[in-house]
Amino acid sequence: MLPWPELAALAGIALIGVATLNYPFAGDQALFAVGAAKLHAGGLLYRDFWDLKQPGIYLFYLAAGSLFGFSEFGVHLLELLVLLGFSVLLQRVLSSYLASRWASAAAPLMIVGSYYAIGTEPTFTQVEMLAGVALFVTLWLAVTGNASRGARRVWYLLAAGIAGAAVLLLKLMYLPVVLAIWSVVLLAGDRDAKLPRSAWPSTIAALLAGLLLPLLALWAAFAPHIGARLLSETFFVYPPEIVARLPHPSIARLFYSGYWFVGYFAPIVLLGTLAFVAEWRRPRPFSLALVVWIVFGSITIALQRQSWWPYQFLLLLVPFGILAASGVERLLASSAAEPARGQLANRRVILVTGLALAFSLIGVKAAAKIEGFSRSGFDLTRADRSAYQFRTSSGYRQARDETAFLNGPLTRRGAIYVIGDPIYYRFAHREQAISLNGWAPMMLLPEQWLSLRDELRRHRPVYIFIESEYQGIVDERSPELLAFLRSHYDVLTHDAAGTWWAAR
């Protein structure tokens, strides 16, 4: 059984996590839920539902929906269970990295607790936090395997490779982060363990086998049904073409996103930085791997020039949080070093007070979420949950109002299509009519705009909605689509939110 400090930290994480179970979806999460529901009904990703992202996030939402329902509650519940399991793993693994039981117990509270405290609609259940969990697992398994010998070593490294494959299934761009972590673990660990050179071939073979086998197995299973050409275009051809053709967002967005991360997680970033500086002359392999994770993770974030959203910086939360726990431990140890008589207690009080003030913003955010949860009647009834979501998200209110007519008795049944926020499908209680999604249409290539028109022509959704935000993009990028709409559809309603077209 876990000691009480560990249990107290886990209870705190569970409390704030439960308070966010019905938190509204943003556009990305709504898209993942729509796609996962399509897969649950028998569709295939990239053939029946197309998105540029790797399959890992859709598999996660599919698992959540299959277990708990394709709702905010179902998705967030699976995420909470995963992060609680991750927290237990952190406490067990870090007990050998950190000397203080309090530090290893509190590390998940810094990482997962602060994630729930600071998180909002766009940040919950995104790729980056899940990738952070998988990156930690591959780091831990690589460290453990590198310190082992014989068959045990091979199995640990093979498992590290499989965890690395999980990272790539979430985002291929994180391959350099995985390889950098492995390289540091093996090279720095070899320095301390004096691994014979004869062990290197089996080491590399085990890691690569674990990395490649799951990916090749998935490719072999699905490529015949989806098409190897479509898969290769989705993963390797379209991303660089999109980056090359589309105008890049202002560099100000990247600075704002970095400022968001550093500002909200300031004590964690500062303590983590101080901890590594303190052991800079001879860093432990684990610490060095965490810093390499931060460096290469920051590079991959900067390379994602078509996004640069704040939630992408969550990839760095796990390594900074672990280092921050080490930083707290070092501060407490230094406060006890050669104190003058009677001053030890005063030092500790000052230090603990300073740490409490540093984490006060995160604490206030956590308290606000718990207070909102209690004010909504703990989301015990459907009405309470809806009131909480509409109070939290203006997008939900707009989607409810815009789709209200679709739930009337005289409205035609059938699938619809939305060029805009996928949350409209949730309130319309309708499926997406075609495979290409209409979220972020600025990312579509010219040939995909033609495919979009052709798919709409074949499937003829009963209603099509174009959000006002994207009307100019449709006008500019696809006059063919507008011509099709004017020939086969009539404008049903037009307001500040957008335009509904009804099939003739």
Image: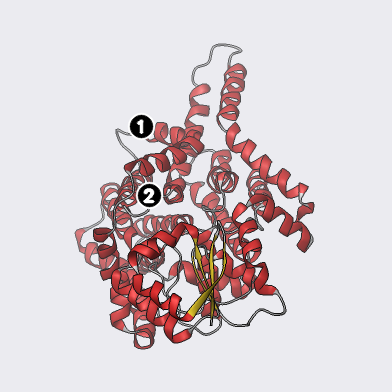
Residue 308: give its label. Answer: 2
Q: Is residue 476 left or right of residue 114?
A: left
- Residue at the far left: name it: 197
Please tell me which residue is depicted at 56% across the width and 77% down the height of the picture: 431
**Residues tagged 2 and 1 counted as in contact (Cβ below 8 A):** no
Please tell me which residue is depicted at 52% across the width and 75% down the height of the picture: 490
Q: Position of residue 94 (x, y in %)?
A: 49, 47
Q: Quadrant of residue 247?
A: bottom left
Front in this rendered view, residue 292 or 455: 455
- Residue at the far top: name it: 341
Q: Report helix, strand or loop for mark 1.
A: helix
Residue, disc 1: 277
Q: Is residue 435 left or right of residue 342?
A: left
Identify the mark nearer the N-term, 2 or 1. 1
Q: Position of residue 186 (x, y in %)?
A: 29, 54
Mark 1: which amino acid? Val
Please tell me which residue is depicted at 45% across the width and 41% down the height of the picture: 261
Label 2 neighbourhood size at 10 Å, few (<14), some (14-19), many (20+)? Answer: many
Residue 258, compared with residue 470, is above or below; it is above
Q: Quadrant of residue 347?
A: top right
Mark 2: which amino acid? Trp
Q: Is residue 489 left or right of residue 393?
A: left
Residue 98: give its label. Answer: none
Please tell me which residue is depicted at 79% across the width and 61% down the height of the picture: 381
Residue 320, compared with residue 32, is above or below; it is above
Q: Report helix, strand or loop for mark 2.
A: loop
Q: Position of residue 404 (x, y in %)?
A: 67, 67
Q: Is residue 471 left or right of residue 223?
A: right
Q: Is residue 1 visible?
A: no
